[in-house]
Image (tube, rainbow, N blue to C red):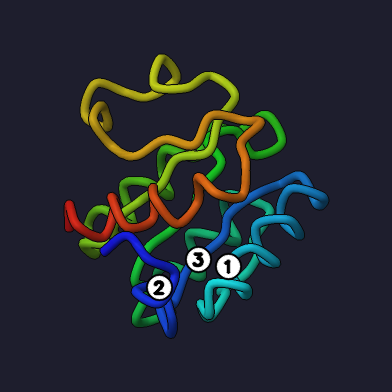
């Protein structure tokens, strides 16, 4: 599942507090044919969304939302079986032990990396 065609129609939740990055991710996902959910910019808003929205095929999640850790969102997504792509400037060192091995996009990243990590996350689900 590595091609852009494999992503067509996938419902992808975007949780990112930086507007320019969120717009960049939205555009890349739309170019892949994904249905973009969000972007959502805050932990509380994301938790409400995750609790009330179905289905979510995969989430692209910033780990630090305006200084607040996004781990409650990670836990809510994991409880629903939603695969996660972590986007962070810290790389894998910013992940909890329980999240090690998950796909990570280290900021800044290139557009070509997104389809690969999305496919990786979906394959792990």
Among the two numbered marks 2 and 1 on one chain, the one whose residue lies closer to the N terminus: 2
Name which residue lies at 21% across and 29% down: 98
Q: Above or below — where is 112 with respect to 50?
A: above
Name which residue lies at 53% across and 19% down: 90
Residue 44 sits in quarter: bottom right
The location of residue 58, given as percent across then percent down, is 37, 63
Q: CA distance from mark 3 to mark 2?
A: 13 Å
Q: Which residue is mark 2?
A: 7
Q: Name the side, left or right, on which 89 lies relative to 3.
A: right
Q: How many marks?
A: 3
Judge by depth and name the residue closer to the eye, 90 or 49. 90
Residues packed near mark 2 inside 10 Å, few (<14), some (14 to 19) or many (20 plus): many
Name which residue lies at 73% across and 56% down: 24
Among the two numbered marks 3 and 2 on one chain, the one whose residue lies closer to the N terminus: 2
Q: CA distance from mark 2 to mark 1?
A: 9 Å
- In the rendered image, the residue lying farthest to the right is 20
Q: Name the side, left or right, on which 80 lies relative to 32.
A: left
Viewport quadrant of the N terminus: bottom left
Q: Which mark is residue 29?
A: 1
Q: Which mark is residue 13?
A: 3
Cβ–Cβ below 8 Å for labels 3 and 1? no
Cβ–Cβ below 8 Å for labels 2 and 1? yes
Viewport quadrant of the C terminus: bottom left
Among the two numbered marks 3 and 1 on one chain, the one whose residue lies closer to the N terminus: 3
Residue 83 sits in quarter: bottom left
Q: Above or below — where is 68 with respect to 77?
A: above
Q: CA distance from mark 3 to mark 1?
A: 10 Å
The location of residue 117, given as percent across then percent down, is 39, 48
């Amino acid at each position: 599942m590595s091609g852009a065609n494999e992503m067509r129609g996938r419902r992808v939740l975007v949780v990112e507090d930086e507007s320019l990055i969120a717009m960049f991710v939205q555009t890349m996902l739309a170019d892949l044919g994904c249905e973009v959910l969000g972007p959502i910019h805050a932990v509380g808003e994301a938790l409400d969304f995750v609790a009330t929205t179905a289905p979510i095929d995969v989430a692209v999640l910033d780990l630090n939302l305006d200084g607040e850790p996004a781990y409650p969102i990670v836990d809510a997504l994991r409880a629903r079986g939603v695969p996660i792509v972590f986007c962070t400037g810290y790389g894998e060192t910013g992940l909890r032990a329980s999240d090690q091995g998950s796909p990570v996009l280290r900021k800044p990243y290139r557009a070509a990396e997104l389809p690969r990590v999305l496919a990786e996350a979906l394959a792990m689900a």
